[in-house]
Amino acid sequence: MNPTALITGGSRGIGRGIALALARAGWDVLINFRSNEDTARETAKECAGNGIRAEVFQADIANVNDRENLLKAIQEKFGRLDLLVNNAGVAPTERVDILEANEESFDRLISINTKGPYFLTQAAARWMIEQARLRPTEPRGQIVTISSISAYTASVSRGDYCVSKAGLSMMIKLFAARLAEFGINVFEIRPGIIATDMTAGVKEKYDGLIVNGFVADRPMGHA
Ligand code: NAP
């Protein structure tokens, strides 16, 4: 039986890259998306081309009922969860100076980027602990979360995003500390600047900065 991974926001960008890499490595995948089902199905089809099982499931990770349904779906479809990849996340719809930024954007980013993964991880961790109890000889579950360079770098035109990712980074440390006794490893990945739909609107700006030595690696990373 293949190990099973749930990738939130696995339909596009970095999540899609992760889903494809896992599929190539022999993992069954559940690809979560929020609104763009066609893209999710295309990614699942590409994953399934590697001879594994790939399914899609719509859920807004900021919504408590959707999170519950997402875990129920993976339980019903695959019966197990070996890897949770907390990848889904959003940037502010508009970059606004921290002296002008509004609460609506702050609440949206905290809900999707921090609170959603926090409670999804909590529920997944409980399930992984139960799996370890029932099947002690099998490999333990693992949790990978995509935070950002913005977890520790100040960008004053998107303070809400930075705060949401710094909180997410602490969430990762907390679960790593709490789950160590169960052998459930918890990892953080902090991407820099990756060319995806999220960064499409600022690609020209960053391409210019990168040419002038803004980061050591060039050009922009690809998912
Ligand atoms: P992206 O191309 O915009 O893709 C976002 C994915 O997340 C899509 O699959 C989208 O689903 C899903 N999603 C968005 N909101 C969701 C929600 N509320 N519930 C469930 N799914 C949701 O983004 P990306 O650039 O690949 O970024 C992926 C992660 O990496 C994010 O956490 C981001 O903060 C982080 N990151 C990105 C960069 C970068 O330079 N791109 C750098 C550092 C960190 P739909 O298609 O249905 O909308």
Image (cartoon, grey):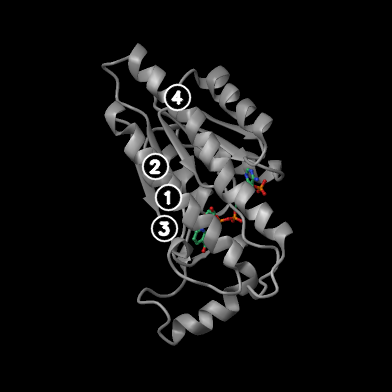
Q: Give residue 33's quadrant in the image.
A: top right
- Mark 2 or 3, which is nearer the eye? 2
N-terminal label among 4 and 1: 4
Looking at mark 3, is its residue's CB closer than 8 Å to ligand 1? yes
- Mark 3 or 1, which is nearer the eye? 1
Residues at marks 2 and 4 touching, judged by CB atoms closer than 8 Å: no
What is the distance, in whole Å, between disc 3 and disc 1 at their CAs? 13 Å
N-terminal label among 2 and 4: 4
Residues at marks 4 and 3 touching, judged by CB atoms closer than 8 Å: no
N-terminal label among 3 and 1: 1
What is the distance, in whole Å, between disc 2 and disc 3 at their CAs? 17 Å
Return the residue nearer the eye: 208 or 54: 208
What is the distance, in whole Å, between disc 4 and disc 3 at their CAs? 25 Å
N-terminal label among 2 and 3: 2
Q: Is residue 202 above or below residue 172?
A: below
List the residue tagged with mark 4.
126
List the residue tagged with mark 1.
170
Return the residue nearer the eye: 130 or 205: 130
Q: Residues within 10 Å of mark 3 (few under 14, many from 20)?
A: some
Residue at the far top in the pictured view? 134
Provide the secondary structure element on which disc 2 rests: helix
Residue 24 seen by the camera: no
Residues at marks 2 and 3 touching, judged by CB atoms closer than 8 Å: no
Residues at marks 2 and 1 touching, judged by CB atoms closer than 8 Å: yes
List the residue tagged with mark 2.
174
List the residue tagged with mark 3.
190
Q: Is residue 186 above or below residue 131?
A: below
Q: Amino acid at mark 2?
A: Leu
Provide the secondary structure element on which disc 1 rests: helix
N-terminal label among 4 and 3: 4
Provide the secondary structure element on which disc 3 rests: loop
Q: Give residue 197's quadrant in the image.
A: bottom right
